[in-house]
C-alpha cells in the first residue's frame, strides 16, 4: 500500500509544480463570439473575439495603458498581435506583456483548430483561411472582411426552451456525467471534436448453439466531471465495471468474471511547440469480486494534439464521401498487486511497469445511405519493464450504428484480441450489443 501512495504522489507532483500546466484552452462557444449578419446567418465577430480573449487572460484597458487613455479596437488588436511593440510605446501594467503573449498563443491555436471543416449537422465555427503575407488571425482582426467565417449555432428544441428551472438544473447536472469504454477517454467532453472518435461502454449478449450456452458482458466507465478545479482543467472521480458471465446447460455453476474499479482522473493542459496538449493522470483501484484479488494501477496519458489531418477533428476524404478522426495517445502504467489471495501467478503477472502508445481511428461515411454507421479501430502496444511479459498489445475493431436523431446510443459489433492493459489478462472476444457514449 505504501508503494501505491508513493506512486499517487509522484503522479501529482508534475501537476503541482508546473506553472504552465494551469493554462486553460481558449475555445468560446459560437454564441459568445458570433453575431448575426442576416436572418439565418452568423459570422465570427472580431470585436467580441478580442473582448473575450482579453477577458480570458485577465486583462482590461487599464492593464494595457495605466494612463487611462481611451483605447480603440485597433489598439487592442495591436496589443494582442505584437505585445512587445505595444508595451514599448504604451504604459502597460507589470505582467501585461506576458498575458498578451498568452492571448496571442490562444488566438493562434484557436484559428488553427477552426480552419478545419465542420461535419454535417454539427454546430461550431468554420474559418476559411486564405494565403497572404500575414497569418489568418492577424488578417482577420485587422480586416474582418478579408477572411470568411461561418458560425453554426446549436439548435434548441421547443422542449428545451420551455423546460422548467428544475429540469434545467437536472440537465445541468447530467452535463457533467461521462460514460465511456475506457478511463482514458474521460478527458474529452461531449462538446469537443474528439468525442466523435471515442469508443462506447457496452452491454452485449451471445447465444452459442454449439456449446448450448448463453453469455453476456457489461463493460464501461462512468465519471462526473468537475471543471476548472483549482489548477486542474477537470477532475473526474470515476467508477469502472466489467462483468462477463456464461451459463452452460448441464453445468452446475455459471462462469462469472466481475471486476470493479474506482479512480480519480486529473487533466491538465500544457503548451508544446505552440499547441496545447492534454496530460491525464489517474490512480485506479480494481477488485476482482470472484477471485478476491486487488490491484492498484497508476496511469499517465499524453494526448498529442498537432495540426495533422484528422488528429482530434474530422478530416474529409474521397471528395467528401467519408471523414475520419484520429486520437493518438502515449501511455505509462505502473501496477502493483495489493492482494493476490494466495495466487502467486496473479502477483507475478500484474506487478509491472510499462510504456507504450495507442492509436484510435474512427471512419464516418457521409452519404445519406450510410448515415449513422461508423467504423472504430484501435491498436495499443506496451513495452513491459517488470514482470514475466516483455511486451503486450491489443487490437480492437467495432462497427457501430447510431440510432437516428441522437448520437449517444448505438448498436455495436465488436472484436477484441490481445491483453487487458490494466490487468494484462488475455482477451479474445466477439460481441454484439448496445453501446453508450455520453
Image (cartoon, helix red, strand yellow):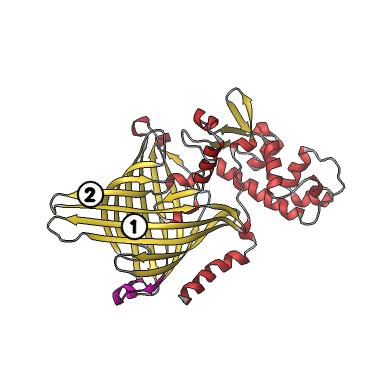
Identify the image quadrant of residue 385: bottom left
Decide: few, some or many residues near mark 2? Use Cα within 10 Å; few <14, some 14-19, many ≥20: some
Q: How many marks do you count on the picture?
A: 2
Identify the image quadrant of residue 364: top left
Q: In percent of the image, x 34 and y 31: which residue is there?
A: 369
Pick the quarter of the image with the N terminus: bottom left
- Residue 261 or 125: which is nearer the viewer? 261
User: What is the magenta range?
Assistant: 336-354
In the image, residue 303 lies at what x, y percent?
49, 56
Q: Disc 2 or 1, which lies upstream in sequence? A: 2
Secondary structure under badge 1? strand
Q: CA distance from mark 2 to mark 1?
A: 16 Å
In the image, residue 47 lies at what x, y percent?
71, 36
In the displayed structure, 252 sits above or below 81; it is: below
- Residue 134 or 17: which is nearer the viewer? 17
In the displayed structure, 120 sits above or below 3; it is: above
- Residue 336 or 322: which is nearer the viewer? 336
Q: In screen coordinates, is 107 left or right of 370?
A: right
Decide: few, some or many residues near mark 1? Use Cα within 10 Å; few <14, some 14-19, many ≥20: some
Q: Which mark is residue 242?
A: 1
- Could you tell me if residue 272 is visible in this image? no
Q: In percent of the image, x 64 and y 48: which residue is there?
A: 106
Q: In percent of the image, x 51 and y 41: which residue is there?
A: 171
In the image, residue 367 lies at what x, y percent?
38, 32
Magenta run includes residue 235 = no
Pick the quarter of the image with the C terminus: top left
Q: In screen coordinates, is 314 left or right of 435?
A: right
Q: Which mark is residue 250?
A: none
Q: Which mark is residue 206?
A: 2
Q: Are marks 2 and 1 in contact (CB under 8 Å)?
A: no
- Could you tell me if residue 340 is visible in this image? yes
Amino acid at each position: 500500500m505504501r508503494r501505491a501512495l508513493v506512486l499517487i504522489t509522484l503522479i501529482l507532483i508534475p501537476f503541482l509544480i508546473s506553472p504552465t500546466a494551469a493554462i486553460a484552452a481558449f475555445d468560446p462557444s459560437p454564441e459568445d463570439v458570433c453575431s448575426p449578419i442576416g436572418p439565418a446567418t452568423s459570422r465570427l465577430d472580431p470585436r467580441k473575439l478580442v473582448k473575450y480573449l482579453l477577458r480570458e487572460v485577465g486583462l482590461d484597458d487599464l492593464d494595457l495603458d495605466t494612463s487611462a487613455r481611451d483605447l480603440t479596437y485597433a489598439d487592442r488588436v495591436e496589443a494582442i498581435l505584437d505585445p512587445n511593440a505595444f508595451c514599448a510605446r504604451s504604459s502597460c501594467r507589470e505582467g501585461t506583456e506576458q498575458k498578451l503573449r498568452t492571448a496571442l498563443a490562444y488566438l493562434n491555436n484557436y484559428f488553427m483548430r477552426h480552419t478545419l471543416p465542420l461535419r454535417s449537422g454539427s454546430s461550431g465555427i468554420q474559418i476559411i483561411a486564405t494565403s497572404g503575407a500575414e497569418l489568418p488571425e492577424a488578417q482577420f482582426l485587422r480586416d474582418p472582411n478579408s477572411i470568411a467565417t461561418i458560425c453554426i449555432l446549436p439548435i434548441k428544441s421547443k422542449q428545451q426552451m420551455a423546460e422548467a428551472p428544475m429540469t434545467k438544473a437536472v440537465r445541468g447536472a447530467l452535463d457533467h456525467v461521462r460514460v465511456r469504454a475506457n478511463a482514458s477517454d474521460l478527458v474529452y467532453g461531449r462538446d469537443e471534436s474528439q468525442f466523435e472518435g471515442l469508443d462506447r461502454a457496452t452491454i452485449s449478449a451471445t447465444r452459442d448453439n454449439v456449446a448450448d450456452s448463453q453469455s453476456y458482458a457489461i463493460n464501461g466507465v462512468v465519471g462526473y466531471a468537475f471543471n476548472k478545479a483549482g489548477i486542474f482543467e477537470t477532475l473526474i472521480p470515476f467508477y469502472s465495471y466489467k462483468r462477463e458471465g456464461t451459463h452452460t446447460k448441464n453445468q452446475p455453476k455459471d462462469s462469472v468474471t466481475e471486476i470493479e474499479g474506482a479512480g480519480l482522473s486529473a487533466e491538465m493542459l500544457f503548451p508544446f511547440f505552440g499547441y496545447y496538449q492534454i496530460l491525464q493522470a489517474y490512480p485506479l483501484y480494481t477488485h476482482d469480486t470472484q477471485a478476491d484479488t486487488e490491484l492498484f494501477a497508476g496511469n499517465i496519458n499524453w494526448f498529442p494534439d498537432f495540426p495533422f489531418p484528422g488528429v482530434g477533428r474530422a478530416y474529409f476524404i474521397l471528395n467528401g464521401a467519408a471523414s475520419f478522426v484520429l486520437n493518438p495517445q502515449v501511455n505509462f502504467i505502473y501496477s502493483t498487486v495489493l492482494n493476490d489471495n494466495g495466487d502467486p501467478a496473479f502477483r507475478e503477472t500484474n506487478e509491472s511497469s510499462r510504456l507504450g502508445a495507442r492509436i484510435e481511428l474512427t471512419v464516418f461515411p457521409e452519404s445519406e445511405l450510410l448515415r449513422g454507421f461508423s467504423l472504430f479501430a484501435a491498436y495499443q502496444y506496451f513495452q513491459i519493464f517488470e514482470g514475466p511479459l516483455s511486451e503486450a498489445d491489443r487490437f480492437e475493431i467495432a462497427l457501430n450504428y447510431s440510432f437516428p436523431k441522437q448520437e449517444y446510443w448505438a448498436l455495436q459489433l465488436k472484436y477484441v484480441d490481445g491483453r487487458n492493459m490494466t490487468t494484462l489478462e488475455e482477451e479474445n472476444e466477439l460481441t454484439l450489443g448496445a453501446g453508450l457514449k455520453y
